[in-house]
Image (cartoon, rainbow, N blue to C red):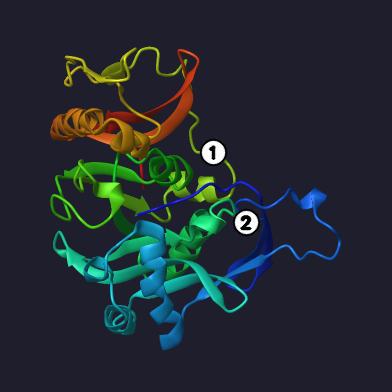
Amino acid sequence: MRTQSIEDHQEITHGRFDTITCKRRGSSPISDLPMSVTVPTIQIQEIETVPQMKVLEKLQQEVWGWSDLDTTPLMDFIILKELGGTLIGAFEGERVVGFAFGFVGYHDEQVVFHSHMLAVHPSYRQCGLGLRLKHAQRTAALERGFDRITWTFDPLQSTNAHLNCHKLRVVANRYRVNFYGEQSSSMLHRYIGTDRLWVDWFLNSQRVVESIEGRPYKNWNATDLEDAERLIEIGLDGLAVYQTVNLHAGKNIVIEIPTNIALLQQQHPEVAVAWRNATRSAFVEAFAAGYVVDDFLRMEKNRDESACYVLIPTRHNEID
């Protein structure tokens, strides 16, 4: 699942969902635009028609680089929406520039609402559309009687991790090794496979409601993490350093990841693979010991930007 920043947007309330005024990637600052230039306005609304659904095939390929065989086809969108799923789009005029796709399923002996896709065209990733699409999806799920949404994402994708764990305040305690197979047609999966964190978004929990209302549920910082155990650290050479940790001592733990795994895949694939192997082992071990992902932080380390997951013992985690 691909996500994006929430910078450079202005929200205007509009019916069930909202309208957003933003500037596209590569455009000049709004203050520098001539008076005759129109800043694009993005409206969040449900995708209803077959032609609107059809364009999602191409949009998937523009976002993830899928081949035709890996692309979710029109007919799947139609039937899954008919059976209780949701398709919510980000529209600039008549053009769909992003979408969130979720459907109803059965998992762990209960009916669930699962979010399968969140996509935003590369030119619109500075408009905060990922966050707004998820908020709209939450509204749709609540209207259908669900109080939880599940989805998956690659734990080495730091942008996705920040959106999901820090802004949306999901929690995770399940790890899926090569969930979609060992490879796909997308460059995102080159060398490192398709490992996923399976997350739960508890829609009416205090952590989620307060984040939506702009009242941070909990702000972790470097001081808070001084006593935490570092299960994975970034070494001075950029490689993953695996630490031996007593996971039954009840301390919070930290798993650091590189901020740009895509660059490593392109320039140092062997390092990217090493990071996959190290973090895979760390998450599996931590979850088996009863830990849950509580947050994801970006901070400075050795004068460089670093990123890390914060995991806490399950008994300390009040999520609903």
Q: Residues within 10 Å of mark 1 (few under 14, many from 20)?
A: some
The residue sitting at the front extreme is: 267
Distance CA(mark 1)–CA(mark 2): 28 Å
Asked whether 69 or 148 is in front, the reply is 69
In percent of width and height, residue 236 lies at 34, 12
The quarter of the rendered structure image containing the N terminus is bottom left
Query: Where on the picture, by quarter, is residue 243?
Result: top left
Mark 2, residue position: 24
Please indicate whether residue 70 sits to the left or right of residue 20 in the image: left
The residue sitting at the bottom extreme is: 50
Classify 320 as above or below 314.
below
Residue 77 appears in view: yes
Asked whether 133 or 139 is in front, the reply is 133
Residue 317 appears in view: no
- The disc placed on residue 75 is none
Marks 1 and 2: CB-CB under 8 Å? no
Query: Where on the picture, by quarter, is residue 235?
Result: top left
Query: Does dot 2 land on a helix, a strand or a loop?
Result: loop
Q: Which amino acid type is shown beneath numbered disc 1?
A: Pro
Q: Which amino acid type is shown beneath numbered disc 2?
A: Arg
- Chain-order first, disc 1 or disc 2: 2
In percent of width and height, residue 106 lies at 18, 68
Residue drawn at (49%, 76%) of the image: 46
Query: Does dot 1 land on a helix, a strand or a loop?
Result: loop
Task: Count the labels in the image.
Answer: 2
Residue drawn at (19%, 46%) of the image: 193
Residue drawn at (62%, 56%) of the image: 24
Tag in front: 1 or 2 = 2
In percent of width and height, residue 210 lies at 53, 46
Q: Residues within 10 Å of mark 2 (few under 14, many from 20)?
A: some
Mark 1, residue position: 216
In percent of width and height, residue 147 lies at 36, 61
